[in-house]
Amino acid sequence: MPQSTDIPGLSVELDDWIRESIRGAAATLPQSGIIEAVNYGRERPGLIPFWVGEGDIPTPPFICDAAIQSLRDGHTFYTYQRGIPALRDAIARYYDRHFSLKLDSGRVIVTSSAMQAMMETMQTVVGAGDEAIVVSPVWPNIYACIHIQQSVARSVALRPDEFGWHLDLDRLLDAVNPKTRAIYINTPGNPTGWVMSRNDMLAVRDIARQHGLWIVADEVYGKFVYDGRHATSFLEIMEADEQLIVTNSFSKNWAMTGWRVGWTVIPKGLGQVYENLVQYNTSGTAEFLQRGCVAAIDHGDNFLAEQVARCSAGRELVCDALLELSNVRIVKPKGAFYLFFRVDGEPDSVNLTKRMIDEANVGLAPGTAFGPGGEGYVRMCFAPSHDTLRTGVERLSEALRKRAAA
Ligand SMILES: Cc1ncc(COP(=O)(O)O)c(C=O)c1O
């Protein structure tokens, strides 16, 4: 079985008989590398968790009300595999309003989370022995999606300098070989906050065209940019009949992480294949959830703008506080809602996250969880409310100041 060259996470202890009797690709799926820190800190009274990718505001009532009304209206039956037409049309309107993009709703498939969209996308484009290029450090679940397909993830690590993170296009091109089928890119990026430039996107598009590769674009943070209205979407620079699959989610825009609804935009000709995969994975997303999602898109622009504004101010708050520390190295994120930073003299990120639990009672995620390029870094989510950020960052600063003085 092909092994991913660098799949991040913790290997799972299994009884011999189980390891020997199940698929190798399932037995070797790692546990998330964030879990080691979470297990270490989860029971601590008063711990402030910045290790997950969500804020602390619940889904707004107008969205919940639409879902409740749908249940009352008796929408409790099997539904469209591709998503209800009302939601697919609403998603097309979302692209029109926010990205000035005219999108045929026939290209939209509703999925049970962006996670599910990513799994179905990898089921579509890679198989045993194939390779997919992954721009890292990145949301680690993508490695698992590739691995379970018995495919190999080949990481190309971003490089930081004082101005931001950069993709080395020559290194990306070097990673292409005859087995390569896809390039996965998450922009704006988790955990780095990297926002890919339009020029780099054009260059990657050209590489993909030249080598007949799929671009799998994870754009769940597309609205979370701190300079401009939105990040460039691959949908803006590629045609409807090209090898492009874009995945997105309701989770981040409208505080709906627990709903597990996402979507994907595919070339139109792929519709039936993708519908089949939905059929055999989940058989569609519950209609009442989708009705809530229609309300989110149609009436949630102000809420979304407030979310982005809150994260923008949260970014300033945490960066300003941590920049005062002589031992902290920050690349200010341009998008998403994470700060990915280093502390001088602390090369072991798992050890640092454990010590920040002990010394500050704050939960961070270790950079090693995010694949190549992440070692030595820790990730802090700045989506929570400002009061929580303020208290957490004060505690962190005090602990890190003590470390600098020690
Ligand atoms: C880059 C990226 N893609 C996808 C997801 C998953 O989104 P969902 O909640 O819709 O599964 C996340 C969640 O953190 C993410 O960071």
Image (cartoon, rainbow, N blue to C red):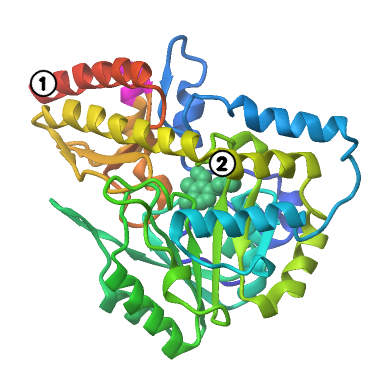
Residue at the outermost top position: 45
Q: Quadrant of the C terminus?
A: top left
Describe residue 378's horizontal placement relative to residue 296 as left or right.
left
Residue in the foreground of this view, choosing between 11 and 399: 399
Q: Which residues are magenta?
A: 355-362
User: Is 361 one of the magenta-colored residues?
Assistant: yes
Q: Secondary structure at mark 1?
A: loop
Q: Quadrant of residue 71?
A: top right
Describe residue 263's horizontal placement relative to residue 76 as left or right.
left
Mark 1–mark 2 Cα distance, whole angstroms, equals: 41 Å
The earlier-in-sequence mark between 1 and 2 is: 2
Beta carbon at label 2 within 8 Å of ligand 1: yes
Looking at the rendered image, the disc whose residue lies closer to the viewer, 1 or 2, is 2
Task: Please give the name of the residue rendered at 11% of the width and 25% of the height, measured from the top-left corner.
Answer: 404
- Rendered image: mark on residue 56: none
Q: Main secondary structure of the magenta part?
A: helix
Task: Please give the name of the residue rendered at 25% of the width and 71% of the height, measured from the top-left corner.
Answer: 168
Residue 149 shows up from this direction? no
Check disc 1 and give the amino acid type: Ala
Task: Please give the name of the residue rendered at 31% of the width and 30% of the height, measured from the top-left corner.
Answer: 314
Q: Secondary structure at mark 2?
A: loop
Residue in the foreground of this view, choosing between 7 and 337: 337
Tell me if residue 245 comes above or below residue 303 in the rendering.
Answer: below
Tag 2 residue: 251
Tag 1 residue: 406
